[in-house]
Image (cartoon, rainbow, N blue to C red):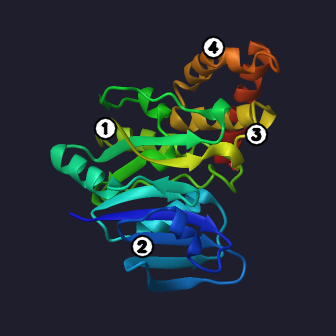
Amino acid sequence: MDLQVLMSTMNRDDLIFLEEVNLSCPALVVNQNTTREGVVDTEYQQLPVKLINSLDRGLSRSRNLAIAHSQADICLLADDDISYHPGYDETILHAYQDYPQADVIAFQVARVNAPDRAKQFRTRKSWEGYLTSMKISSVEISFRRESIIDSGITFNTDFGAGASFSHGEENIFLYDCLDKGLKILYLPIEIGQVDASQSTWFQGYNDHYFHTLGAKFYNMSQVSYPLLILQFALRKYGQYKGVYSLKQAMSLMFSGAREYKKGEGE
């Protein structure tokens, strides 16, 4: 069983940035840029690296391209601001040996340099359902590549950085996994950290943020999306109440759902 890090980045001229990542297993790097395309098999610090230069734009397109080109048994999603802890590769591979029934295993990746965005992780392992899977972020996700490929699961390219709706792609991905009968396990084991001080998508609670949430919830469940909107509005009210009322937040989310629904019919 082998592990490969699937990393998304943009506008790179070299692989020097990998020094901060602390790789200890092979990697596949998708470099979205404006001038080059093609696949290069190379090395970084004696580790195999497949570099894919792509003219496409959008994080979900980058993720899909990486999955399509990977040949590893286990894949680990990554962004270019992550720094892994020593032994992360062994931790992940041992987890799949210990839980052979798991198709997807999520770990902990700490947020640093942004106290207001620190994430409080659960302390017990959990087999995930539709609601608990929404607590998982993309860089915490690993999976058996064969399970994803055989189930025909891809990232929705309408969502994620660089797309019409700027976030939520990992939640939709995990919902699709559950819909296809895949088993998702969360383990309270920290494998790395990310610098959360320069988020590319979260700029606080604003109109676009709520709009995107509504579209995401509609995509996840055309039947239950009103309940998903309501639970989020109530659960996060304490964080946005200084800017939006409960009614305003819900109205923006329903507006996003309507926009996405309209786009589906075109």
Up-down: is 163 above or below 38? above
The structure residue drawn at horizontal position 69% and vertical position 57%, both measured from the top left corner, is 162
Question: Cα distance, mark 1 to mark 2?
Answer: 25 Å
Is disc 2 placed on a helix, strand or loop?
helix
Which residue is pictured at 60% across the width and 37% down the height?
Answer: 216
Mark 3 residue element: loop
Looking at the rendered structure, the secondary structure element under dot 1 is: strand
| x then y, percent, for residue 266 | 69, 50
- The local crowd at label 4, few if under 14, some if 14 to 19, many if 20 or more residues have their Cα within 10 Å, is few
Q: Earlier in the sequence, mark 3 or mark 1?
A: 1
> Is residue 244 left or right of 160 when viewed as pictured?
right
Tell which circle, 3 or 2, labels the residue nearer the N-terminal end: 2
Identified by mark 2, the residue type is His
How far is the residue under mark 3 from the one under mark 2? 32 Å
Q: Mark 2 points at which residue?
A: 69
Q: Nearer the viewer, residue 137 or 218?
A: 137
In front of the other: 170 or 203? 203
Please rate how many residues cluster around mark 3, counting C-alpha atoms within 10 Å: few if below 14, some from 14 to 19, many from 20: few
How packed is label 1: few (under 14 Cα within 10 Å), some, or many (20 or more)? many
**Residue 64 percent location from the top left of the image:** 49, 62
**Mark toward the viewer: 3 or 4:** 3
Q: Mark 4 = which residue?
A: 234
> Can the viewer see residue 227 in this picture?
yes
Q: In this view, does 33 lie above or below 224?
A: below
Residue type (three-letter) at the residue carrying disc 1: Leu
Does label 1 or label 2 sit earlier along the sequence? 2
The circle on residue 203 is 3
Q: Name the residue under label 1.
A: 185
Q: Where is residue 17 in the image (x, y as percent from the top left)?
A: 58, 69
Residue at image coords 57%, 17%: 231
In this image, 124 relative to 50: left or right? left
